[in-house]
Image (spheres, rainbow, N blue to C red):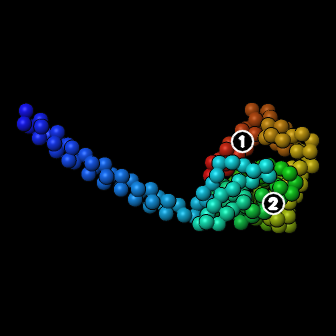
Amino acid sequence: MFKKLGLIFVWFLITPSVLLTSGLFMHQINKNSQAAIVGIPQMSAQLSLENQMRGEVLGTQIEDLRPYYVTNFLKDTKLEPYSGYMVEVSDKYGIDYRLIPAIAMKESGGGNAIKEVTHNAWGFGNGRTVFESWPNAIDTVGKTLKEKYIARGLTTPEEIMPVYAPPQVETGGKWAKDINFLFSKLESL
């Protein structure tokens, strides 16, 4: 009986200390984990009407996180330095900002699987088209997607595929499936 009372007494003495210590420990872990992600934008969960996401990095308000998403998506590719420009061109032509980088990743691994002098990461002309520069290529791709696809009501990868990559229709639509997968990957970064 005294043994049980002794254990209960010890439990009442130790429990508050353990709870206090673990609470302080968890607070310190939370504080350290926030410090570890200082370079990562703190995002709100809502999109504005302009298809822009809002966030904050080190107290600086960022109006549009899409260039950061595209940069992370194109990490270590030839197109990474042009991430912000892809978003600008997408806005200029009123197309989904994910389309230009996703097609580039699908067709050439973001430009890494082509001869850079062609600047043709999108497989235009079955890869035979040569652009004068990356900005020229990005603008041409954006304009072409707008005029030959989006303006004609072809807005999803499934609708774009029969015109952009016709052989893929006969093989079960892998091109559209890959583009949709890349869309989801880009959004999850």
- Is residue 53 among the parts visible in the rendering? yes
30 versus 8 height, above or below? below
x 87%, y 54%: residue:
93
x 74%, y 32%: residue:
172
Give the CA distance from mark 1 to mark 2.
Answer: 21 Å
User: Residue 187 or 171: which is nearer the viewer?
Assistant: 187
Q: Which dot marks residue 117?
A: none
Q: Quadrant of residue 52?
A: bottom right
Q: Quadrant of the N terminus?
A: top left
Q: How crowded is mark 1: few (under 14 residues within 10 Å), some or many (20 or more)?
A: some
Q: Quadrant of residue 70?
A: bottom right
* Secondary structure found at label 2: helix
The three-letter code of the residue at mark 2 reads Glu
Q: Position of residue 64 (x, y in %)?
A: 72, 58
Total marks placed: 2
Residue at numbered disc 1 = 180
* Secondary structure found at label 1: helix
Q: Residues within 10 Å of mark 2 (few under 14, many from 20)?
A: some
The three-letter code of the residue at mark 1 reads Asn
- Is residue 112 among the parts visible in the rendering? no
Residue at numbered disc 2 = 88
63 versus 164 height, above or below? below
User: Residue 122 or 130: which is nearer the viewer?
Assistant: 122
Is label 1 in contact with label 2 (beta carbons under 8 Å)?
no
N-terminal label among 1 and 2: 2
User: Residue 177 or 26: which is nearer the viewer?
Assistant: 26
Q: Position of residue 164 (x, y in %)?
A: 84, 44
Q: Where is residue 71 in the image (x, y as percent from the top left)?
A: 68, 60
> Is 7 placed left or right of 41 in the picture?
left
x 16%, y 42%: residue:
9
Q: Where is residue 91 in the image (x, y as percent from the top left)?
A: 83, 55
x 45%, y 60%: residue:
31
